[in-house]
Amino acid sequence: MTNIITAKNLSKNYGKFKALDDISLNIGKGKIIGLIGPNGAGKTTLLKSILGLTAYDGDLQVMGVNPYKDRAKLMHDICFIADVAVLPKWIKVNQVLDFVEQTHPNFSRTKAEAFLKKTKLGTDQKVKSMSKGMVVQLHLALVMSIEAKLLVLDEPTLGLDIIYRKDFYDNLLNDYFDHERTIIITTHQVEEVEHILTDLLFIKDGKIVLDSNMEDLSEEYFEVMISADDYEDALAFKPLQTRKIFGKYVMLFKGVNRGELEAIGEVQRPGVADLFVAMLKEEDQ
């Protein structure tokens, strides 16, 4: 199976509101996907559809099954974690392990306990006594002890400081990802995950407005630092976005020959956040 997820004409309405609007996409095995979009764009509804938590119109296959009709079967190969604050304050570490062991068939308690031994977490420690960083470590122990083919992370580091956010993603990449698993990440802190992504999905108003791998993006989109002297020449290439920083212009271009751009400024790959903002503005025009 080359595709973990295949969607064709996927739609979801809440009354007159279209949360998903005729989406078609393929997500392959061994990918780390960044699902990026503004609030209300359809990210959560798409994830709920993939996880079998909501009905939908159209065709959706996740690891070869209909997620809504065959959710029990699907959950054997999926791990889903949202905001780390979801754990109840009263629960102890060993109770969390008990719960996951009883509910997920592919969970290895031995692996989880081995990971936790590297931390300062005690098995009788309650969540209410933990720092946010400790809760992240507990979540990581759970994630990396589940043999899942698909891992879905919905704002997993929300509210954490930068040190723990970095540790979370470094551990995820170095200790979990093996090019066989597929990971989908939604986050508003795009700059912190773009270095681990293999692919990008931009969603707006229930539609996919970009579906690309990072390598293709690097060949199609360029960000150029341009001096005031070259500003008029640069405008001839029709930038998608222009902003001014310290007396120079930073322009984003699509489909322009890199050599021509290098003649008028310093070329680099645009950040995902800048690309996202520029594309949304382009869609609105």
Image (cartoon, rainbow, N blue to C red):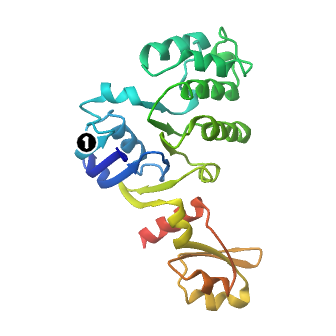
Where residue 83 sits: x, y (%)? Answer: 54, 33
Q: Quadrant of the C terminus?
A: bottom left
Q: Is residue 14 visible in the rendered structure shown here? A: no
Q: Residue at x 54, y 63 (%)?
A: 215
Residue occupying the point 61% across, 62% down: 271
Going by the image, does 217 lie left or right of 124? left
**Left/right of residue 182 with respect to residue 132 in the rendered view:** left
Identity of the amino acid at label 1?
Tyr
* Outermost residue toward the top in this view: 124
Quadrant in which residue 145 is drawn: top right
> Residue sitting at 59 percent across and 26 percent down?
139
Numbered-mark total = 1
Give the image location of residue 150, x and y in percent.
Answer: 44, 37
Q: Is mark 1 on a helix, strand or loop?
A: loop
Q: In this view, does 67 lie above or below 238?
A: above
- Of residues 224 and 85, which is closer to you in this image? 224
Residue carrying label 1: 56
Query: In which quarter of the view is residue 46 placed?
Result: top left
Left of 38 or right of it: where is 65? left
Mark 1 surroundings within 10 Å by alpha-carbon count, few (fewer than 14), some (14 through 19), many (20 or more): some
* Residue 1, x across and y down, in percent: 34, 43
- 215 left or right, relative to 19: right
